[in-house]
Amino acid sequence: MNFLNGALLAGAAALAIPILIHLFHKSRFQVVKWGAMHLLETVVRTNQRRVRLEQLILLLIRAAIPVLLALTMARPIWQGAKTLLGDAKTSTVVILDSSYSMEASRGGGLSNFANAREESAQIVNSLKRGSDVQVLLAGEVSTPLFDTPTFDTDRAAKSLGELQAGFGAATIPGALNSAAEAFEQMHESSRNLVLLTDFQRISFPAHEDAALGQALERLRQLPVPPSVTFFDIGDEVKDNVAVESLEFSRLMVGVGQRIQIRANLRNYGEANYPDLRVYLKADGREKTASQITLGPNEAGQVLFTHTFDAPGSHTIEVFADADALKADNSYVASIPVRDKVPVLLVNGDPNPEPLKGETDFAEIALQPYGSARVEMADLIRTKVVTAEELKADAVTNASVVVLANVRRLSDEQVRILQDFVKNGGGLLIFPGNRTDTQWWNSTLAKDSRSLLPAGFGAMSGDPKEGARGTSIISQRFENPALELFNDPRNGSLAEAGIKLWFKLTELPPVEGSSTSLTLAGLDSGDPFLVEHQYGEGRVLLAATALDSDWSNLPLRPFYLPLLQRLTVYLASNVYPPRNLGIGSPLVAFLPVTEVTKKTSLTRPDGSTESLSIEKKGERGVVEYSKTQLPGLYTLLPPDGKPVHYVVNASRRESDLEKLSAKEIDDFGKAHGVRIVRSGAEYQQIEQTLRYGQELWKVVLWILLVLCFLELIVQRIFSKASGRV
């Protein structure tokens, strides 16, 4: 016996009320000696026994009424035999493993997912009319097939037949938790949960076993726990080749710039691929092909080069026609190609003399061809303003802002820069002799949530000629901003001679804020370049000045590639991101003038949706969250220039190794779930399961009968007492 609302059983305590009333009103008598009383003793004793019996009967009836009322409200459920109750309507949740490994098939037959789809449809079709059902897709994000559980089993079965896999890696604990939430919306007292999966080893890792157990325990703690069945649907398929990732030689791609694409492939099976053909596509068109040899369980790389002739949003795809599991045979990336990278140089110490201003050397380094009047294109386009000219309109069109020896900023300028970086912009800061470090520390370097990644400490060094300074430590750089200098041909940062610098100090940490990273250090033991994330953008803080007053940096060969690399690194942060994971929201920023207009989104399956542009802050925003299907999403804004978004599934599913039959059975025993391997076996188990029946209606009828019975019995007893 179970109860849907067990807490209401406490109402049964109300049976004490009629008992207390009975005791309070119990007949009291006083002994009076009367000589002739002995003649009536027999009659009195007889009447006393009758009255006590009548009072006991009424007391039992009255005490039973609140108890039955509490039972009715608690909704009791009897799990009786099917032969007595017949087939009961059920609430059923079907969890369908929709990870892309389910698309694997053996010998060119039906895929595991196709078999799971058919078995799921049969389970739904076998439900009694009036049952409610929900279907969950167990990909990287657990996705319900219907907004709410449906009683239309025919519709559910038809929808199952139209499903496709390829939804990334399976997360079983998350799917079970979603099932618990679905049962909370369902109505029947008989409840079943069936999960159809290929039992891929990677989907049942040991480190997730505790989370899976907790999810199953949550199901058992429901007011009416469901019966849980895991359906082993898959044949093991061992051969599989996957394109695991793409790497690009440039942080940012410009028009006409040659980019090298490195594709990483892995053979997860025992088959040998001596001449595996690998293809490169750009914007959906095949460009070139290469060849690779992959032995059993081997990894390899293929290199391609490509040049984009026009700016805008482009795509690169590398694919290998290796096996029947198509989901991981290709890898796609969205690449924004820039015509120019706008950089705003804020000169805190302008000077009319050549190379005397704070940003003069930087301007030459960032656009060397334009400065030398050579007819070659610079990717970076600079604009120089004074600190007083730093305004919102100047920042709006910039990808990176460089502050050079700026004394301090107004409150409005601080807000402008904070908003700029939060929304994905890059900020590069060089101090100098005019920098008011006290103001910077008190305003922008209070703790790790602040705009600056570090605070300004004391100034070190000696500007005198011949005084010993410091230099940048020569090391292997891991950060993309400086890894360029791991190749000696690009110069050595150790050649720097720095006479004056600020000691950059660590900021007090705040929970939830980003941690600052020291990208390069000085041989004095102080940081040279510090970075942290601020909102969606990045901030880099250097310890010395941008010009030649404090160091010989502008006179060293590495100065040009250093500034260009730092600038491109900051500008390469594409926000909102266009390369997404399964279930990550797709977001586009558009001009605020486009608000209320419509955009068109084309999904990987070819379907299109119309999306509205909404105003958020000072911009128009388009958001789309239904990105469970991997592939290319193309957004067409009102200006007609397409923006490409790519959703790639995690490649951990590419290892198709399956748990052994013994491991699957042991899993079922350890977690208390039934394991079946065929539809017939599942139906046989279902025939032997007990079906639940709610008893609250029966109890309610008994309660009503007792209420009428109490009135009738009291009336009868009262008449009987009157006759005596």
Image (cartoon, rainbow, N blue to C red):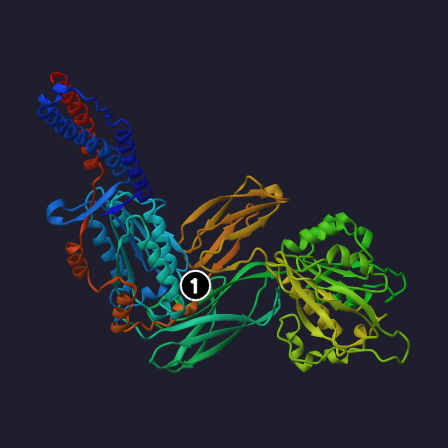
User: Residue 67 location in percent, x, y?
Assistant: 25, 37
> As drawn, is 421 to the left or to the right of 434?
left
Depicted 680 relative to depicted 52: above or below: below
Task: Determine the residue located farthest toward the top in the rendered image.
Answer: 723
> As drawn, is 399 to the left or to the right of 282?
right
Say what amino acid the circle numbered 1 marks.
Ala
Quarter of the C terminus within the rendering: top left
- Residue 243 can be seen in this image: yes
User: Residue 21 location in percent, x, y?
Assistant: 28, 29
Residue nearest the observer in this picture, 657 or 175: 175
- Residue 329 can be seen in this image: no
Depicted 584 relative to depicted 238: above or below: above
Residue drawn at point x = 62 percent, y = 75 percent: 478
Residue drawn at point x = 22 percent, y = 24 percent: 31
Q: Quadrant of residue 559?
A: bottom right
> As drawn, is 257 to the left or to the right of 346?
left
User: Residue 502 location in percent, x, y?
Assistant: 79, 68
Residue with the mark numbered 1:
649
